[in-house]
Amino acid sequence: MRNNHYADRMLMNSGLNYTIIRPGYLSNEKGTGLVTAAENLNGGSIPREDVARNNRSIS
C-alpha cells in the first residue's frame, strides 16, 4: 500500500494525463460487463473478469 502511495504521487507530479484505477474488492464471480466509474465510490466489489476487460479497453 505504501508503494502505491509513492507511485501515485510520482504520477500526479509527472505532468502526464493519467487515470488511477482502484477496483476495490476483487471477486471471482463471473463478469457482468457492468462497471461503475466515479471520482469517489464507497466500497463494493467487482469481478476480476470485468476489471481485466475494461483495463484492456482503456489502454
Image (cartoon, rainbow, N blue to C red):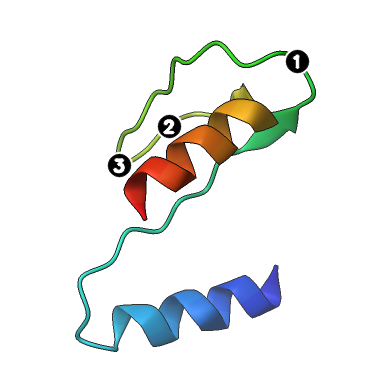
- Residue at 68% from the left image edge and 32% from the top image edge: 48
**Would you name the residue on which mark 2 appears?**
41
Vertical order, 37 against 18 (above or below): above
Q: Nearer the viewer, residue 8 or 30?
A: 30
Question: In the rendered view of the protein, which quadrant contains the C terminus?
Answer: bottom left
Whole-percent x and y of residue 23? Answer: 56, 40
- Residue at 31% from the left image edge and 34% from the top image edge: 38
Vertical order, 30 against 47 (above or below): above
Mark 1 residue type? Glu
**Would you name the residue on which mark 1 appears?**
29
Q: Nearer the viewer, residue 59 or 51?
A: 59
Mark 3 residue type? Glu
Judged from the image, the secondary structure of the residue bearing numbered disc 3 is loop
Question: In the rendered view of the protein, which quadrant contains the N terminus?
Answer: bottom right
Q: With 9 as the anchor, is 24 left or right in this view?
A: right
- Whole-angstrom CA distance, mark 2 to mark 3, is 7 Å
Whole-percent x and y of residue 49? Answer: 64, 28
Tell which tag, 3 or 1, sits nearer the viewer: 1
N-terminal-most mark, 3 or 1:
1
**Would you name the residue on which mark 3 appears?**
39
Mark 2 residue type? Leu
Tell me how many marks there are: 3
